[in-house]
Amino acid sequence: MLYRTPTLTDDDRAVLELIRRSWMQLRFNLQNHPRRWTGLLARTLRARAIQGSNSIEGFVVSREDALAVVDGDEPEEADEESARAVSHYRDAMNYVLRLADAPDFTYTKDLLRSLHFMMTRDDPSANPGTWRPGAIYVRNDQTGELVYEGPPADLVPSLVQELADQLTSDDDDAPTRMIRAAMAHLNLVMIHPFSDGNGRMSRCLQTLVLARGGVLDPTFSSIEEYLGRNTQAYYDVLARVGNGTWSPGEDTHQWVRFCLTAHYRQAKSAERRLAAITEIGSEVEIELKRQKLPDRAAVALVNTALGERLRNSAYRHHADVSALTASRDLKLLSDSGLLIAQGAKRGRSYLAGPWLQACAARHRQNAPIEDPYKLFKG
């Protein structure tokens, strides 16, 4: 027996409709904006999802290193363990994206074990790709308090099989995909089938369920960034639903509400970012033309205006140029004042200059995104 999907309230259905409308609008905007700007948003969201999901597990990397991982480059600042963790998670997520529209797809225990192996293959203590051999306990890192005990190890294979069967039988049920993805996450993390990596696996599975025939590309519908930004709230709601031990009879409604709130806020955040990227991009293109600087620098400048440090390797990715051409372009952009160079030689990076900073400030939206459930109070 697994944790059961709660009966949805009118407010839940109203929030679901808000999210669907936001996704449809975002999909329309993505189809009708220049590829250079939608591609930049996709790259940014993928990096933030990888960074957010791994930060929950203590693998902390800078945004620039997360972007490097998305580009297939090696992180420059992260410690070796964190660099491996985020790179392996990228590999697993790349596989998830490939499975999004696979016509002969089914959820299986072997699929989950394969994803786990991809994520943890360098950590023998995680028993990569195999179920945990015994009991498992989750403790509060700060207090040492035991907060959850998973079901007995001998139940793990049958529980995971039940979850896989349930997901496969419902795979075409798009109207409730967000709810099903949330419940898949909850059930896998409560089964806690692996010695380590259960949180990452559960978040990855949630993204996979969203990806299967969803309204929006999982790059734009995943809530992993939100969970990384709201880790304590995420832990708190799991602790309340888990109630200390495997308890599939517990009410799961608060978990579903938490996930729907995350989806709404993540969708609104993506809308804001796309608007900012395109508006800043238009001004950057005009400024490059005015100063007679190469137009290929536009995407890198917009990314830097949004707060990222720019490296030579990232510029090469954005502009699709050689290292030599990148160095020449970056010198021109520094001389123009659009960028400010920091460091020397291999450690050199670039920050937004005053003009780019002012441009970003004109299009920044700092107002907090509302709780969707409060829109229906009264």
Image (tube, rainbow, N blue to C red):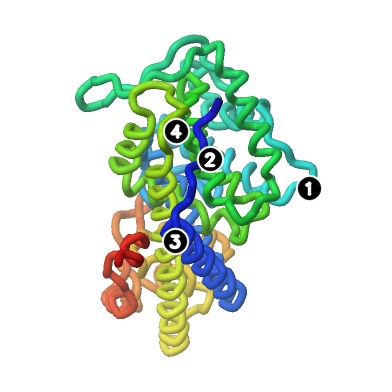
Residue 15 is situated, as x and y percent measured from the top left of the image, at: 44, 61
- Can residue 58 be seen? no
Q: Pointers 1 and 2 in contact (CB under 8 A)? A: no
Q: Which residue is mark 2?
A: 204
Q: Which residue is mark 1?
A: 103
Say which amino acid is labelled 1. Pro
Where disc 2 sits, the SS reads: helix
Residue farthest bottom in this picture: 290
Q: Which mark is residue 199?
A: 4
Label 3 Cα neighbours within 10 Å, binned few <14 / some 14-19 / many ≥20: many
Where disc 3 sits, the SS reads: helix
Say which amino acid is labelled 4. Gly
Identify the image quadrant of residue 339: bottom left
Above or below, 234 relative to 353: above
Say which amino acid is labelled 3. Val
Residue 357 is situated, as x and y percent measured from the top left of the image, at: 29, 73
Q: Quadrant of the N terminus?
A: top right
Q: Nearer the viewer, mark 3 or mark 4?
A: 3
Q: Classify residue 321 as left or right of residue 19.
A: right
Q: Residue at x 40, y 45 (%)?
A: 52
Q: Earlier in the sequence, mark 1 or mark 3?
A: 3
Rounded to the nearest angstrom, the CA distance separating label 3 from label 2 is: 23 Å
Identify the image quadrant of residue 99: top right
Label 4 Cα neighbours within 10 Å, binned few <14 / some 14-19 / many ≥20: many
Q: Nearer the viewer, mark 1 or mark 3?
A: 3
- Can residue 272 be seen? yes
